[in-house]
Each structure stands twice: as C-alpha cells, then as structure tokens.
Image: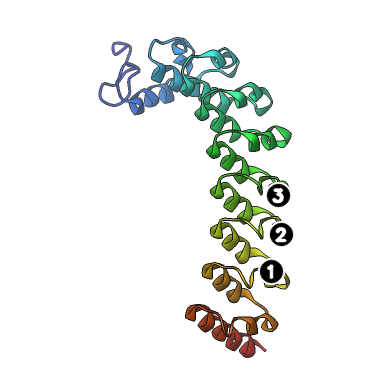
Amino acid sequence: MQRQGLCQRGRACVHDRRARRVDRFFGSHPGLADEYLDHPYFEVRAIAARYCTLFRLPALMDDPEPEVRAQVALRLPPARIGRLAEDPDRRVRVAATSRLAGKALVAMLRDPDYYVRLIAVRRLPPDVLPLAAGDPEPEVRRWAARRMPPERLGVLLGDQDPLVRLEVAERLPPARLHLLADDPDMRVRFAVVQRAPADLLGRFGRDAERLVREAAAERRAELEEEG
C-alpha cells in the first residue's frame, strides 16, 4: 500500500497500531473503508465503520465487538437502530440513546445503566422529564430538575437528595419557594433566600445558620432598593 502512495508511515496508515493514524488513513481514503469491515482487528473495523458506505452497516450489527456496533448506532438512521438500544453492552446503548427520539428515547429511561438514562434525560423534551423523578440515581434526577419546566418541579420537592432539591430551589417559581423555606439542608434554604419574594424573607430572620440570615438581610435590602 505504501507503493501506491496511500500509506504514510508515522502519520496515516491502516496497518499502524495507533487508532489516530488508522483514522487519518480512512479520512483520506474513505472509499477503501468497505474493504476493511471484516479485518481481524476490531479497532480497524470500528474505524472503517465510521467511513464505509451506509448500506454495509446493517451487517455490522452482529459484530462481536461493541465498539463496532456503537459506530453502527451512530451512523444508521435512528429509525433503524432500535435493536441496538437493547444491546447487552452499555457503550452501544449509550450511542443509540444519543440518536433516538420520541417513544424510543423515552423507553431508555428504563435502562438498567444510569449513564444511558442520564443521556436520555439530557435529550428528552422538558415536558417528559417528570417521568424521571423516581430514578434511583441522584445525578439523573438532578439533570431532570435542571431541564424540566419550572411549573413541573413539584414532583421533586420532597426528593431525598439535597442536591436535587437545590436544583429545584434555583428554578422553582418564586411564588412557590415557601415550599422549601424549611428545608433541613442549609444550601437549599440559602438558594431559596437568593430568589425569595419580600413576604417570605421574614421566615429566615431566625434561621439556625448565620449565612442564611445574612443572605436574607441582603436580599431584603436589594428588594427595597429596587422598590
């Protein structure tokens, strides 16, 4: 292949051990990718799958290596990757979740792997995110709290994780902040004070935490100036 001027040793070659150089090779010669889809090394097959013609991809759904199947999930039209959403390897399901939409994406909220569910929560329409309020992983619920419509945040008011409630306190409509005014975590109460309307601030004058009391006084002064 070097004789044909296709391989550049040390920079771009399909026989190189470094994936970056193999990728450079196929980037320069994408028309050759189809010829390497049955290569004995999965790294070469996976990179070739990034550049091969689309009609060759379905056959790779049965490749024994997840890296290859993940490339298929990233390139085939979303309507054709439903089977990969149930792949036994999380890497393939993560790739599929990054492409799915509609009911197929909602279904990924039931995936056993938290990172797959996290990708789904980051991509789903905000109106659907209350469905993730009961997720067992706090990070998934925190992302749901960051993205769901503020008026729907009530489903997370009683979340057991204070960082989830903190996300809620930072986005809940001001008229409903009184629902978190007595939160046991001072970080949540502090966040409430930062956005509290004037008629709620009096409840923090005797707060057990000095920082919360001081923040309430500053917020009151700020509202009076805006006045």
User: Residue placed at 62% from the left, 74% from the top?
Assistant: 195
Does 167 appear above or below 176? above
Q: Looking at numbered disc 2 in the image, what kind of residue is underneath it?
A: Gly
Horizontal side of 207 relative to 80 (left or right) equals left
Does 227 appear above or below 1? below
Does 120 appear above or below 146? above
Judging depth in this view, the residue of 197 and 92 nearest the camera is: 197
Neighbour class for label 1 at 10 Å: few (<14), some, many (≥20)? some
Q: Looking at numbered disc 1 in the image, what kind of residue is underneath it?
A: Leu
Callout 2 secondary element: helix
Q: Which mark is residue 179?
A: 1
Callout 3 secondary element: helix
Mark 1 to mark 3 CA distance (whole Å) = 18 Å
Judging depth in this view, the residue of 132 and 62 nearest the camera is: 132
Discs 1/3, front:
1
Q: Which mark is residue 130?
A: 3
Q: Residue furthest left?
A: 10
User: Residue placed at 73% from the left, 57% from the top?
Assistant: 152
